[in-house]
Amino acid sequence: MARPLRLEYEGGIYHVLNRGNYLSAIFRSEKTKAAFLSCLGENCEPCEWSQRS
C-alpha cells in the first residue's frame, strides 16, 4: 500500500535531502556533485524554490 501524498502549503518551507545508506557518500566525484547541483538549480527557478547549500 502506497503512503498518502504529502500535503503542500502555500509559503511552506520544504527541503531536499540526499544521503547514502549508512551516511556513505552519494557522489563519486566533485564533477558528479556539481552536475546534480546544476540540475537542481535549473529546476528551482521555474518552481520558485530557493537553493541553499
Image (spheres, rainbow, N blue to C red):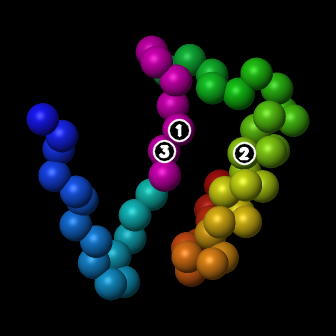
> Of the residues shown, which amino acid type is indicated by label 3?
Leu
Could you tell me which residue is drawn at 80 percent across and 34 percent down? 32
Q: Are marks 1 and 2 in contact (CB under 8 Å)?
A: yes
Asked if disc 3 and disc 2 are in contact, CB closer than 8 Å, the reply is no
What number is the disc on residue 17? 3
Name which residue type carries label 2.
Phe
Element assignment for label 3: loop
Q: Earlier in the sequence, mark 1 or mark 2?
A: 1
**Residue under label 1:** 18
- Is 3 situated above or below 11? above
The residue depicted at 62 percent of the width and 69 percent of the height is: 44
Gap between marks 3 and 2 measured at Cα: 12 Å
Q: Read off the residue under disc 2.
A: 36
Can you tell which quarter of the image residue 8 is in?
bottom left
Label 1, secondary structure: give it. Answer: loop
For the magenta stretch, what is the residue range? 16-22
Q: Earlier in the sequence, mark 3 or mark 2?
A: 3
Q: Is there a contact, CB below 8 Å, between mark 3 and mark 1?
A: yes
